[in-house]
Amino acid sequence: MKPIHLIAGLGGLAIAGVLGWYLHMQSTLPYETTTERGVPIAAGTDAPASAAPATAAPATAAAPATDAPAPRRPPAAGRRRRPPTPPEPPGRPAAPGWRARLASTGAAPYPAGMSRLRLILGGGLVLVFALLVGALFRYLDRPVELAATPATRPAPATAAPDPVAEAVAPVSEDEAPAVWPADAPRILHGRVHDPDDAPIAGATLRVEVGTAVVARARTAADGTYTLRDVPARPDRIRVQAAGFEPHADERPRFPAGRDVPYDVTLRAVPGLRGLVLAEDQPVVGAQVTLHGLVRRPLAFARTDDDGRFFLPWVDGATTVSAQQGQYGTAREPVSGPGEIVLRLPLGGFIAGRVVDQAGRPVEDFSVSASPLTWGRGGPPAQSFSSEDGHFLLGPLAAGRMEIWAAAEGYQPAERRGVEVRAGETVEGITLTLRTSVVLEGQVTDARTGRPVEGAQVVPAEWRSGALAEAVGTYTDADGRYRLDALPGVRTSIRVKAEGYRSVLIGGVEGAPGSRVVRDFALNPQASDALPGSELTGVGAVLASHPDGVRIGQILPGGPAEGVLAAGDVVVSVDGDPIQGADMGKVAQAIRGEEGSEVELMVRRGGDGPPERVVLVRGRVTVPDRHHMPRN
């Protein structure tokens, strides 16, 4: 407690004592003559009426108005009365006290109980007053923050701005305060350039708080950028550009003000950087390859959202190429690090119709195309809605194409060997769809048996993965799914869900329009385990061979482990020769439902007479690093 508080309390108590004494001395008001248990009490005396001298006038005698007050109405019942005053002892004269003095005025004091009540109430009021005074001194003694204001300028009538509110609300150029709050967001602007002051286009700037990116921007062709809503104290600013060493500014501190100039210099890394264009527009996702002698690939890259790329330089490189499924391939010679622009040729188009087996147009469908040359890829599937079933697919890279069409309730249709020319449209293509088998079932957790919601179920045997996903489906809240756009031949189904290993199940087939039920159980993907997938088969990686397929690798834990060996050649599956057969169809024949048998004719080491081998299909875990056909 501070001294000022103690002084205020003592002062309040002193005032309470003085006021109580004053109330005690002044607690007099006209008091009515009354009786106590039938004993009259004369006004202005302390003795009862029976103690009056014998010479006193009788009660019936009239008294002067000035000597005796007129009789009063008795008080109401229940009123508390003061007890009668006992008579003075004989021989002792009555002392002329304050009661006698008051009697001479014709008034009587309050009863003793009422005087005490007044004293208590007065003391309580003064105590409350003292507490209020102490609180007032405490309030006046608290520290007060004073804002520095020019003496000649009056304080504004409005309240001071809230820095937190200003940090959230956008502020226009005209409304920006003269003094920007220290914790308010900043606007960073500047250039990203190399040591020679040449602008770096397409550089990415990211502002991080912890591990989260709270603001990002990309530089324009002249290297300029603007970063808005940048926290006043970010953890770091990262700047990256293809072909340059990355820059990281840890815990940067900004000067006062809202607009902060922030230039960054990046040092170049020796390599080949450039731009891929088609019809004078940047091409996103084009594959760029640096080649050596006999076109041996030395380095790969993909163009970013601005069509730019960077390739580290490799001694011995002679050419660089860019390829994209919608426009084709461009190739240029190179002799050393530097910059280059690759222009892709114009793409072509395919026009046609999609009909059902009765020749009626299919109104809603998807079409995709892929080059017949492996590794070149193709454009994504395009969806169409047409009353007469017409479509226009493209642009497509020039070359021989394979085309697929798919729709719900139908088997996919395929057309091979369609020749596409740059800048031209191929017309007259008709794709006929036939009724599909319907596949239904449930996807569950292999450990708990609970349904898995949101799992993707797609046909797995199509070369057009985009089209497979276009006609695929997802499980509902009960883990149930329905697929009605499957091939009319034996096929495999891939099921994948977040947090689980994907599984590839083969051996799905049925008559058109029939209903097949197949349930899938997914194993959770452990957080500390390598990513991978599962399949039902024999656990062998296949490679092409003139006599059939060659065993390239045996997966651990699979049915083929200890039975087959790398280098063995499979020449038939379930009695059907596979010499010259498509690799995908061979893999589909070897795959099948878990627990079923498959018969293989195998040449050990690729030589000698075939040997019959029977394996029971099982579920095999495959690490993601494997990309060859697996069974």
Image (tube, helix red, strand yellow):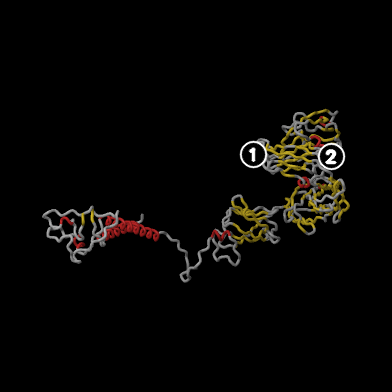
Element type where label 1 sits in the image: loop
- 272 vs 68, left or right, is right
Which residue type does callout 1 highlight?
Answer: Asp
Instruction: Please count the marks in the image.
Output: 2
- 233 vs 300, left or right, is left
Which residue type does callout 2 highlight?
Answer: Asp
Q: Position of residue 96 (x, y in %)?
A: 16, 60
Q: Position of residue 266 (x, y in %)?
A: 66, 56
Task: Give the alpha-carbon distance from disc 2 to disc 1, as whole Å.
Answer: 38 Å
User: Where, by quadrant of the figure, is residue 26 drawn?
Assistant: bottom left
Label 1 belongs to which residue? 528
Q: Position of residue 595 (x, y in %)?
A: 75, 31
Residue 424 vs residue 134, the one in the foreground:
134
Residue 275 vs residue 504, the one in the foreground:
504
Residue 518 vs residue 115, the one in the foreground:
115
- 236 vs 425, left or right, is left
Q: Residue at x 60, y 61 (%)?
A: 170
Is residue 583 visible in the rendered image? The answer is: no
Q: Is residue 84 above or below residue 586?
A: below
Q: Residue furthest front?
A: 60
Label 2 belongs to which residue? 582
